[in-house]
């Protein structure tokens, strides 16, 4: 028997998760439902087996597991609109930055079960990195089901809910930071006469290979940097510029800004 999984919101992240589910090993065990103010967004997902619902309340009435895939700025109104459809079996899964389980209970005026998730857009390619936390009302079996969705679409890690705002910079926003970093290298290649598509392919593979070295080589980050840095060589010349430009401080500032904004959105 299939499990009904619903989505309130069919924007970039909701769509990424739905497409990820439809293309992973769990696809034959899950029936997908969705509603969005822009019905055409849900219509475009029909090829992935997503059934359109008329509104958010219908999604909740049909599904045990309901993803809240809406922006933090509008989530409170959405929660109020579905409060009458929530049952004791409903599990809300929030992917909205800064939103916690207490907020969900207060906004719905229910004792709803909730799972808080910080995913990222590489879920589109089943290469997502998602952090998850559950409240005390969610059973281990229910939480395992939600975790299995994200594991089937990439990597998933369980963290304490108190750190869900801080982790946004680590996996939720970091793809954008990495893309900006990549743009700098590709723009440099174009400036010196290297074809941009060639540069993109080479740099992207360098990212993939470097990521595998981080996860699979057994070396620490510092050791990996040293392995590439021959004394007096080209890498050290470049690293000197990155260090003098305080790259690590800039990254820390970007992460702090992400976290600060998450706390602002939670108010």
Image (spheres, rainbow, N blue to C red):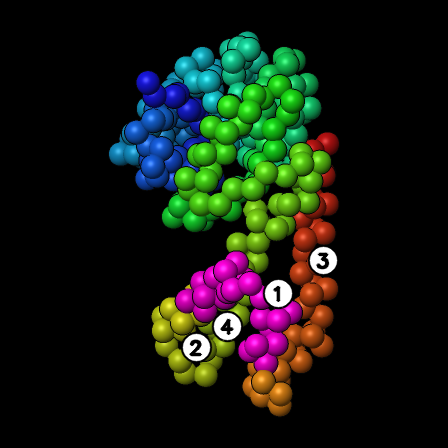
Q: Kindly report the distance in space between the C-alpha atoms of the residues bearing marks 3 and 2.
A: 29 Å
- Residue marked by disc 2: 190
| Residue at 43%, 18% in the rendered image | 63
Q: Nearer the viewer, mark 1 or mark 3?
A: 1
Q: Which numbered disc covers residue 112?
A: none
Sequence order check: which comes first, mark 2 or mark 1? 2
Observer-side mark, 1 or 4, equals 1
Q: Earlier in the sequence, mark 4 or mark 3?
A: 4
- Residue that carries the numbered disc 3 in the rendered image: 253
Residue 63 in sight from this viewpoint: yes
Mark 2 lies on a secondary structure that is helix
Can you name the residue that lies furthest to the front here? 218
Q: How many marks?
A: 4
Which numbered disc, 1 or 4, marks the residue that appears first in the sequence? 4
Residue 74 part of the magenta-drawn span: no
**In the rendering, at what x and y percent does residue 15 appear?**
41, 37
Real-space CA distance between mark 2 and mark 1, rounded to the nearest whole angstrom: 33 Å
Q: In which quadrant is the C terminus drawn?
A: top right
The quadrant of the image that shows the N terminus is top left
Q: Quadrant of residue 55?
A: top left
What residue does disc 1 label?
220
Can you give x and y, in whole percent of width and height, for residue 134 in the image? Answer: 61, 28
Q: Residue furthest bottom?
A: 232
């Amino acid at each position: 028997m299939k499990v009904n999984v619903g989505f309130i919101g069919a924007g970039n992240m909701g769509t990424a998760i739905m497409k990820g589910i439809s293309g992973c090993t769990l696809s034959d065990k899950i029936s997908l439902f969705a509603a969005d103010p822009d019905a055409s967004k849900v219509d475009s997902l029909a090829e992935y087996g997503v059934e359109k619902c008329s509104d958010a309340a219908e999604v909740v009435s049909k599904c045990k597991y309901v993803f809240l895939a809406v922006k933090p700025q509008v989530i409170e109104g959405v929660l109020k609109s579905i409060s009458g459809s929530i049952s004791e079996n409903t599990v809300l899964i929030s992917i909205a930055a800064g939103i916690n389980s207490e907020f969900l209970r207060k906004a719905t005026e229910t004792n709803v079960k909730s799972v808080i998730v910080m995913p990222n857009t590489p879920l589109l390619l089943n290469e997502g990195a998602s952090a998850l936390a559950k409240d005390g009302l969610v059973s281990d079996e229910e939480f395992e089901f939600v975790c299995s969705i994200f594991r089937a679409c990439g990597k998933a890690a369980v963290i304490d809910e108190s750190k869900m705002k801080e982790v946004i910079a680590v996996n939720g926003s970091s793809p954008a930071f990495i893309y900006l970093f990549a743009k700098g290298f590709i723009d440099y290649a174009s400036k010196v006469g290297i074809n941009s598509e060639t540069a993109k392919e080479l740099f992207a593979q360098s990212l993939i290979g470097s990521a595998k070295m981080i996860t699979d080589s057994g070396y620490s980050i510092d050791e990996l940097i040293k392995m590439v840095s021959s004394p007096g060589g080209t890498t050290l010349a470049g690293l000197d510029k990155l260090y003098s430009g305080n790259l690590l401080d800039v990254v820390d500032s970007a992460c702090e800004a992400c976290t600060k904004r998450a706390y602002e959105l939670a108010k």
